């Protein structure tokens, strides 16, 4: 199972993807608000894809960092810190530091125990947020949040123009960093840990420390995504911390394919657009669709969308 | 003393009965994990299916609750036996991630179908009169239902003990758990035992779903909502250790009840904090190495 070195796919899909994201801005002017939230979720999926596909950290609690980032940005704005870019950076920093603490404790585990601990942790955080109404607003969420113009020039409007481009810019920045990390020597040692952590520690690699660094980076990206969600919607609800959100992001990444950094970029939009369309009919059609999709990906569609594209391109090339 | 005794009685009665329901539902998960190394996130489906059937059949067919519970149990046994053959069997040997995805997908699809059939709300569950009264103990009223659940639990425990420790079926099954390839080499049809064990686990989950409906209300989201709880119990029980899962379930039931009794504002916080600490302390299972 190769990760990343799907060079042909990466370059081509990457170019097409960014062009499509820009084109969508002009082609669907009425959907820019929805588009912005898709981009934010794509960023969140990217952060999870790094942890799952790249470091092999199976987690059902990634929404924890997304939610904390969202609440940090919301509380900052309510406390008067309304500058958006620094708000996002602070949120990312907070979740990154939080993940260092949590990572050192939980990353000793793997497989089912890790899955279970991350799941239980996210239940704990959700319960805590639900009870701490003074900080989180409880069921009502945080309302009345506003932000200063981006870079002091661009004003927030209801049309979603700024939201879309702002989210796209952040996604591009984070993607650039993620891509650099993945292709660095550090990234290579990460792949080694994923494939055989015992052998890596025999080679002298500080496995736990490297995993924690990666986990913290992914958590920081998730926090950034959460903060962006707060800024583009001017609202934070408990939903950001829920188990459903963790499952959502897992499905997005798997649907896109875990063996390429492009998996998240492909999976998240497809997932959210299908969700948007089916929920227009009946919210429970959606659960049926997602259930069938998940079983399909496991049995017939291994490697998700990016795996499928790779196969298409590769057969095309060898002929 | 006047204060402590009723509180202790309350916690014991409610905690143990809750723990027993969790145990009965979790056995199937412990078995599938121990036998087939399959992480089945859809196990709650059998509990909720049993519950929905048992509480809907009386009005549909005009039969008593007891008869309907038995029919539901048989139906769940059949359904799970077939599902194991056509679906869960295919998960053998897949990675944990793939098993998680396929089974959670199954769980979602089932939730959707259940919602189509019965609507998204909690099912109104009414137990027959003979098990829904009250009795007084130490100057307090306690529901008879809790005692009934405990009695059910005792019967199931006894049956399981007889089945696993005192029949040749049990001995063969334990052989399959302990050493699969050796069991195969001696001519045991391991696959058949897998199917039967899976069906038994699903049937027990159905009983848990029916009997426990007073504690874990029946709703379409049931299998997903209670998943963290079931999964933690299984993770703490270690691979295929049923005795450990009884201890863990009782601890969870008691701690959760005590937590909600003394600090109700914390809700599920208490028990999950305990579970996380326990898993970090003993990742191989709470009673790993203890037989």
Image (spheres, rainbow, N blue to C red):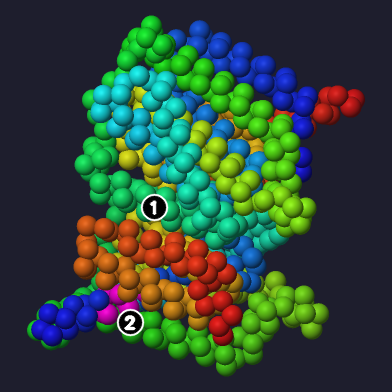
The chain to which mark 1 is attached is: A
Residue closest to the far bottom: B166
> Residue at the location (57% across, 20% down)?
A172
Q: Which secondary structure lies at badge 1?
A: helix
Q: In terms of image quadrants, where is residue A93?
A: top left
- Kindly identify the residue that appears in the image at 64 percent across and 81 percent down: B173
Q: Which numbered tag is attached to residue B150?
A: 2
Q: Quadrant of the C terminus of chain B?
A: bottom right
As for residue B17 lying within the magenta part, the answer is yes
Res. A123 mark: 1
- Lateral position of residue B198 relative to residue A247, left or right: right
SS label for mark 2? helix
In the rendered image, residue B92 lying in the magenta stretch gets the answer: no
**On the image, which quarter does residue B24 sit in?**
bottom left
User: Is A274 rendered above or below residue A170?
Assistant: below
The answer to whether residue B101 shows anywhere in this view is no
């Amino acid at each position: 199972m190769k990760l990343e070195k799907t060079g042909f796919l990466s370059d081509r899909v990457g170019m097409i993807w960014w062009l499509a994201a820009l084109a969508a801005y002009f082609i669907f002017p009425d959907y820019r608000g929805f588009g912005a939230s898709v981009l934010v979720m794509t960023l969140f999926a990217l952060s999870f894809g790094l942890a799952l596909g790249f470091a092999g950290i199976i987690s059902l609690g990634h929404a924890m960092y997304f939610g904390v980032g969202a609440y940090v940005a919301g509380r900052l704005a309510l406390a008067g810190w309304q500058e958006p870019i620094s708000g996002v950076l602070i949120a990312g920093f907070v979740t990154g530091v939080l993940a260092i603490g949590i990572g050192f404790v939980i990353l000793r585990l793997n497989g089912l125990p890790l899955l279970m601990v991350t799941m239980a942790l996210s239940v704990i955080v959700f319960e805590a947020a639900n009870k701490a109404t003074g900080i989180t607003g409880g069921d009502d969420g945080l309302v009345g949040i506003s932000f200063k113009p981006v870079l002091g020039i661009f004003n927030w409007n209801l049309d979603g123009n700024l939201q879309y481009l702002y989210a796209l810019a952040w996604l591009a920045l984070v993607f650039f960093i993620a891509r650099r990390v993945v292709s660095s020597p550090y990234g290579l040692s990460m792949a080694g840990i994923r494939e055989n952590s015992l052998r890596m520690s025999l080679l002298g690699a500080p496995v736990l420390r490297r995993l924690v660094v990666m986990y913290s980076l992914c958590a920081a990206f998730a926090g950034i995504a959460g903060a962006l969600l707060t800024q583009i919607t001017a609202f934070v609800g408990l939903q950001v911390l829920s188990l459903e959100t963790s499952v959502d992001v897992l499905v997005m990444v798997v649907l896109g394919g875990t063996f390429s950094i492009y998996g998240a970029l492909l999976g998240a939009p497809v997932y959210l657009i299908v969700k948007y369309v089916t929920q227009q009919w009946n919210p429970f059609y959606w659960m049926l669709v997602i259930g069938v999709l998940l079983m399909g990906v496991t049995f017939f569609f291994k490697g998700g969308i990016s795996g499928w594209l790779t196969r298409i391109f590769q057969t095309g090339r060898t002929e | 003393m006047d204060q402590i005794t009723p509180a202790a009685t309350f916690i014991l009665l409610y905690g143990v009965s809750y723990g027993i329901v969790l145990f009965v539902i979790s056995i199937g998960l412990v078995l599938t994990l121990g036998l087939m190394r399959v992480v089945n996130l859809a196990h709650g489906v059998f509990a909720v299916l049993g519950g929905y059937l048992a509480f809907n059949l009386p009005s549909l067919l005009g039969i008593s609750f007891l008869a309907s519970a038995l029919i539901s149990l048989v139906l769940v046994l059949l359904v799970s036996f077939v599902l194991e053959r056509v679906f869960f069997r295919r998960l053998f040997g897949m990675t944990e991630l793939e098993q998680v995805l396929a089974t959670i997908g199954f769980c979602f699809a089932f939730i959707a179908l259940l919602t189509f059939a019965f609507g998204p709300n909690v099912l109104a569950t009414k137990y027959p009169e003979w098990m829904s009264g009250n009795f007084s103990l130490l100057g307090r009223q306690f529901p008879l239902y809790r005692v009934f659940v405990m009695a059910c639990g005792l019967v199931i425990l006894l049956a399981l003990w007889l089945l696993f420790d005192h029949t040749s079926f049990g001995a063969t099954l334990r052989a399959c758990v302990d050493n699969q390839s050796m069991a195969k080499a001696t001519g045991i049809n391991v696959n058949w035992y897998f199917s039967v064990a899976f069906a038994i686990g699903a049937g027990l989950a159905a009983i848990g779903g029916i009997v426990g409906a007073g504690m874990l209300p029946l709703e379409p989201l049931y299998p997903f909502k209670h998943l963290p709880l079931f999964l933690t119990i299984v993770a703490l029980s270690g691979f295929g250790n049923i005795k450990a899962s009884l201890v863990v379930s009782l601890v969870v039931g008691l701690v959760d009840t005590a937590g909600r009794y003394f600090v109700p504002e914390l809700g599920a916080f208490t028990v999950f904090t305990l579970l996380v600490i326990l898993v970090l302390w003993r990742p191989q299972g709470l009673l790993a190495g203890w037989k």
